[in-house]
Image: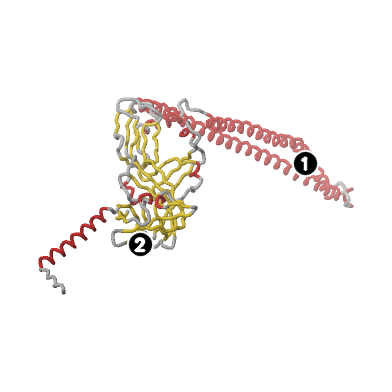
Amino acid sequence: MKKKPVIISAAAILVLAGGAFGFNALGKNKNETELVNVAAVKLEKKDIDDSIGISGSIKGEEYPIENSQQSKCIKVNVAVGDYVKKGDVLFEFDKDSLQTQYDKLVQGYNTERDKMETEHRINERNLENAKNTNSAVISKAKQKIRDAENARDNAYNQYNNIVNEYNALVEYANGLLQHPDITDEKSETAAEYRSTVEQYINLEEKMEFLHSGLSEYDNAVTAAYDAYDEVRMSDNGSIQSAQDVLDAEQFAQYSIEQNDIDQLDEQIKKCVVKADRDGIITALNVREGAMPYGDTLCTITDVNNYFITASLSETKIYKLEEGMKASVKTVATGDEEIDGTLSEISSIADISANMESNAKTYGIKIDITDRDKLDKVFLGMTASARIILSTTKNVYAVPYDSIISENDKYYVYLAEPSDVGYTVSKTEIEKGIETNYLTIISGAKIKDGTIVVSMPETVEVGKKVNLILE
C-alpha cells in the first residue's frame, strides 16, 4: 500500500525551522561560555633595548653660599622654593659698625700717606739740592784748576821766552868775540859786544827770578787738584746721604695697613649677598634680626641641569660605561620618555649603604639631556630610568614569561583563528637576547601578526580561547 504524502503546513515549517534555529543558537552560546579569556600579544618587528633599570628622584647640582658674615641680617629677600637669577640680592647684613671702622682706618691711612708723601717730596728736593750744590762746587773747583794751570803755563811760557832770548844774546855775544875788531875797545863791535853782555846779564837775573817762582805755580796746580778731589768726595757724600734717605722710604711702614682696609672693604661688600647663579633656593639658614647659623647662608640648586642618582649592585655596575644613553620617566609625566646620559660611575663601593650586608653597591649619575622637556621635570619628582646597554633592531620579542622550557627546548603557545574563537597551538622557538621584560624569539611560525599567549600556564594545546591583546 502506498504511503500518502505528508503535507506540512507553512506554519509547521516555520515552527520546525524555528526549532532548529533555536537549537543551534543554544548550542553556540553554550560553546562560547566555555571560552577562556587569555592575555596575548600580536607580533610585529621592533627595536629591542637591553637595559638596566634604576629608580630615584630628580635632583639638581647644589651650590652652597658660604657664611662669612660677622653681623646680623637686616633683610631676607628670598624663601625656600624661590627661583633666583644671577645677581639677585638675597640678603642684606648690618654694615654700620664695619663702615665706621673702615672710615676711621681710611682717614688715618690718608693722613699717614699725606705725611709720607710730603717727606718724600722734601727728600727728593734735598737730593736735588745736594746734586746742584755738588755741581756748582765741582764746577768752581774745576775752574780753579784751569786758572792755576793757565797761570802756570803763562809763567813757564814767560820763563821759556826769556831763556830763549838769553840764549840768543849769549850766542850773539859769542859771535861778536869772533869779529877782528873786538880787540879795539873803541870799535863798534866792541861797543856792541859790551851792550849785548849787559843785556843778557840783566835777562839772567830776571830768568833766575822767574825760575825760582815756577815751583809755586806747580804747587798751585797740585793744590787745585787736591781741593777738587776733596770737594768731590765731600759733596758726593752729601748726595749719597740724601739718596740713602730717599731709598729708605721703601722700607717705611704705615701704622695702618692697606690690607686691613681692603679686608674691611671686602666685608662691607659681602654684607650685600647676591646670587652667583640661576637656580632655586633649596635651603635657607638666615632669618632677619639674627646672626646666620651654620657654614652656609643658603643653597642654590641648578634647575637647568637635572639628574638622577642611584646605586647598582656589583653584578650590574660592570656592564656600564660612562656616556651610555638612558631613558627617563617620572610619575608626573607617565609613559613619556625623556633622554638622558650616564655621566658618572663611582669606582668605590658605597659602604655606608651596605652596613648590614656584604652586598656591594656603586653610585651612578644620569644627566637629563633633553633640554626641550626640562619644563616638565621638577626637583624631587619620583623618577625611573633605563640605561641602554645595547639595541637590537627589527626583531620579534615577547614577555619572557610567555616562554616555556621542555627538555632543553623552548616553546610558546600560539592563538590561531578557528570557527569559534581561537585555538591554542604550540611551536618551538629559538631564544635571543633577554632584557628586563622582553625576550627576542625566532622560529618557523614566528612572523608578523602571529599571536602569542602571554601566560602559557593558563592554556593547553587545542583549547578554545578568547583574546585580550596587550
Q: Nearer the viewer, residue 453 or 11?
A: 11
Tell which residue pokes out farthest to the bottom in this image: 2
Report crowding for label 2: few under 14, some 14 to 19, many 20 or more residues within 10 A (C-alpha).
few
Mark number for residue 449? Answer: 2
Residue appearing at x 30%, y 52% in the figure: 36
Q: Nearer the viewer, residue 72 or 392?
A: 392
Which marked residue is nearer to the observer: mark 1 or mark 2? Answer: 2
The span from disc 1 to disc 2 (Cα, nearest Å) is 155 Å
Q: Which percent across, then down, holds residue 406?
A: 46, 52
Q: Quadrant of the N terminus?
A: bottom left
Q: Is 281 drawn above or below residue 17 in the view shown?
A: above
Q: Which percent across, then down, holds residue 140?
A: 60, 37
Q: Which percent across, then down, holds residue 252?
A: 52, 28
Q: Secondary structure at mark 1?
A: helix
Upstream in the sequence, badge 1 or badge 2? 1
Report crowding for label 1: few under 14, some 14 to 19, many 20 or more residues within 10 A (C-alpha).
some
Q: Which percent across, then down, holds residue 87?
A: 34, 40
Residue appearing at x 46%, y 40% in the figure: 363
Side of 393 where 467 appears, left or right: left
Q: Is 207 drawn above or below residue 22 in the view shown?
A: above
- Residue at label 1? 203
Side of 217 where 408 appears, left or right: left
Amino acid type, callout 2: Gly
Amino acid type, callout 1: Leu
Tell which residue pokes out farthest to the front in this image: 1
Side of 421 where 2 appears, left or right: left
